Image (cartoon, grey):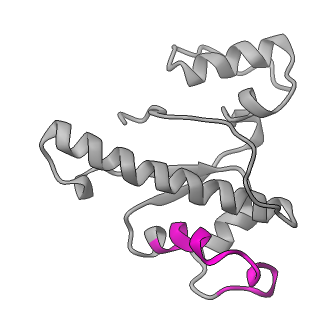
Amino acid sequence: LWEKSFAWSSRKQSCVALSTMEAEYYAASQAAQEIVNLKGVISESMNCSDQNLNTVLKVDNLSAISMIKTYQNSKRGKHIDIKAHFIKDLYLKKIMDLEYVNSEENAADLFTKPLCKEKFIYLRNVVMNAVVESKQYID
C-alpha cells in the first residue's frame, strides 16, 4: 500500500520443502493468500475495486520466480502440492506481479536470520516504514 509493506509474518512452514526454491515457492503462495485477503479489506474500506490496487510480491529466489511465471510445471516442481500453485494462477491472471528482491534488501531477513546491529536497525526501519537514509553498511 503506497509502496510500503502492509503486513508481514514469520512462522515455520507446515510442509517439508525439498529445495530452497520449493520453500520460497510455498512461502510466496502463502503470502499471496494473505494479499488476496488484504486487498479485499482495503478495497472495501477505500470503496474501490480491488483490481485497481496494484500488488507486487517481492521474492528473493529467482528460481521460485521463474517457476511461478512459467505456465507449465517443470520436472523440479512436479511434486509441489497443487494448492501452492495458487500464486501461479494469480500471476497468470495479472492479479499480482512479482519482483526480485536482493538478499541484502530483503526485510524478511529481520525475522529469519541472525544479523549484525547495523543491518538489524536498517531492516527494522524498513519494516516499520521509517525513513531509511543509507545502505552503505552492507558490504
Q: Quadrant of residue 132?
A: top right
The correct choice, above or below, for 51 with respect to 92 in the image is above
Residue drawn 18% across the image and 54% down it: 49
Instruction: Tell me: 67 left or right of 114.
Output: left
- For this orientation, the residue located farthest to the front is 14
Instruction: Tell me: 12 left or right of 34.
Output: right
Q: Is residue 135 something one can see in this rendering?
A: yes
Q: Quadrant of residue 25?
A: bottom right
The correct choice, above or below, for 115 with respect to 118 in the image is below
Residue drawn 73% across the image and 29% down it: 111
Instruction: Give the position of the N terminus as an image quadrant.
Output: top left
Look at the image and give the residue range highlighted in magenta: 73-89
The correct choice, above or below, for 87 with respect to 41 in the image is below
- For this orientation, the residue located farthest to the left is 47
Residue 30: image location, x then y, percent:
58, 54
Instruction: Give the position of the C terminus as an image quadrant.
Output: top right
Residue 60: image location, x then y, percent:
71, 50
Q: Is residue 55 something one can see in this rendering?
A: no
Residue 42: image location, x then y, percent:
27, 40
Q: Is-magenta flag for residue 77?
A: yes
Task: State whether the magenta stretch is mostly helix, strand or loop.
Answer: helix
Q: Quadrant of residue 75?
A: bottom right
Q: How many marks?
A: 0
**Foreground residue among 128 and 9:** 9
Residue 101: image location, x then y, percent:
66, 46
